[in-house]
Image (cartoon, helix red, strand yellow):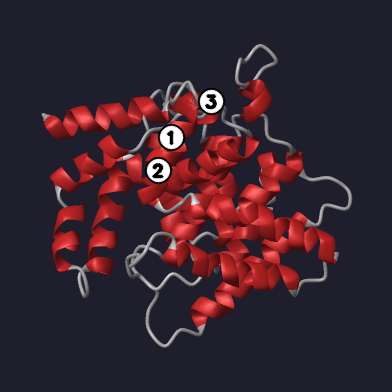
Amino acid sequence: MPQSPIHEAFAKLKIQGAEDASGKPLEALENLFDVSRNYQGGFSQFLQELVQTEFWQSQNYPGNPYLDLCLKLGAQIDRYNGSLAHPEPPYHSRKHFQDVCLSLTLLLGQLAGLTAESTDRVIWAISPEEAWTLLLCAIAHDYGHDGSMNASPFQLERGSIARTQSFLLESSIPPGLAQDLCDKIEPIILATDLSSFNTLLNQFTDPLNQPNKNDCMCMLMVEADLLASVLPQQGQLLGKLLSQEWQPHHPQAAIAVASDQGRLKFLEHIRFISPYAMMLKMEDIRKQSIEELKD
C-alpha cells in the first residue's frame, strides 16, 4: 500500500543541524511544507493522515478523547470554510492551518531529545494530553479568520476561541472535560497575536519571572505558528500571500510585508527559545536569514 505524501515527507526528514539525509541544509524542511502546499485533499483528510504519523501514534493511548476531537474540528472547519461566499484568505487559509499542524509535529517530534539531563526538562516536558491539546489549538487558532488585521488586541483570536469553545461544549465529551479544554485553549490561542510576543518572551528572558508549563505551551504554539515563515523559500512565499491578503484594506502594510525590509523586521522581532526549536536549529536559521537579508 503506497504511503501518503505526508508520511513520505516525514520518512525522508532526518533533521540534524537543519540538514536532510543528503546533508543539504533546509531542503527536507522546505520539502515538508511544499507537500502541505500541494496537498490535494481537504483539511480533515490532511489531519487523518497526520495523526497516523509516527509521532502522533506514539502519543496515542486507550480512551484518548483528543484524537476524535481534532478530526471532528478539522471537518467542521472544512464545512465552515467551504461554505464561505468568498474565497479563503490567501494566507490565513486551511493551508496555513496545515503548516502550523506540521510545524507543531516537527517541534514535538524532538521530544525524545529532551533527556533527563536537560535543565529545562521539568517545565518543557510535554505529556501526551498536552501534545494533543496543542494540536487542537493548532487546528483551531485561526478558525474563522477573515483575512483582516486586528482592530484591537486579540480581536481575531477571540473569535477563533469562541468558535472552538462552542464546538467543544456541543461535543459528546464529558462536560467537565469540555470546560477544562475551553479554559486551556484560550491563553494558548491568544498567544498567537504577534503583538503580544514580547510579553510572552519576557516570561523566559526576565530573571525576575518564573515561566510555568502554560507559558511553555503558549511559546510552542507561537513557534509552530511562525516556523514555516522563517524558512527562506517558504517565508518568501508566505510573505507574498500575506501581502495579497492585506492589499484590499491595508495596501501600505501589504507592500511592507512583501519587502525585504519588512521580512527583516519580522525576523528581528521574533525568537525561537524552546529546546524543541533549538534541536531543530530554528534560531540558527532565523539568524542566518537575517544576515542574508542584511547583505
Which is more N-terminal, label 2 or label 3? 2
Vertical order, 117 against 74 (above or below): above
Q: Which residue is mark 1?
A: 201
Q: Is residue 246 left or right of residue 90?
A: left
Residue 272 in percent (x, y) is at 42, 32
Q: Choose between 289 and 25: the one closer to the eye.
A: 289
From this viewpoint, is residue 209 visible? yes
Q: Which mark is residue 79?
A: none
Query: In the visual, does 69 lie left or right of 198?
Result: right
Where disc 3 sits, the SS reads helix
Q: Residue furthest top?
A: 117
> Dots 2 and 1: beta carbons under 8 Å?
yes
- CA distance separating discs 3 and 1: 14 Å
**Residue at the image position 68 percent from the left and 63 percent from the top:** 71
Asked if residue 5 can be seen in this view, the reply is: no
Q: What amino acid is found at the position of numbered circle 2 in the picture? A: Phe
The residue beneath circle 2 is 197
Residue 29: where, in percent of width, then height? 43, 38
The residue indicated by pointer 3 is 275
Check disc 1 and give the amino acid type: Leu
Mark 1 lies on a secondary structure that is helix
Specify few, some or many for label 3: CA neighbours under 10 Å numbering under 14, 14-19, or 20 or more: many
Q: Residue at x 19, y 27 (%)?
A: 291
Crowding around mark 1 (Cα neighbors within 10 Å: few <14, some 14 to 19, many 20+) is some
Occupied quadrant, residue 239: bottom left
* Residue 252 against residue 123 in the figure, above or below: below
Separation of disc 3 and disc 2 at Cα? 18 Å
Between residue 264 and residue 1, name the one nearer to us: 264
- Vertical placement of residue 123 versus 189, above or below: above
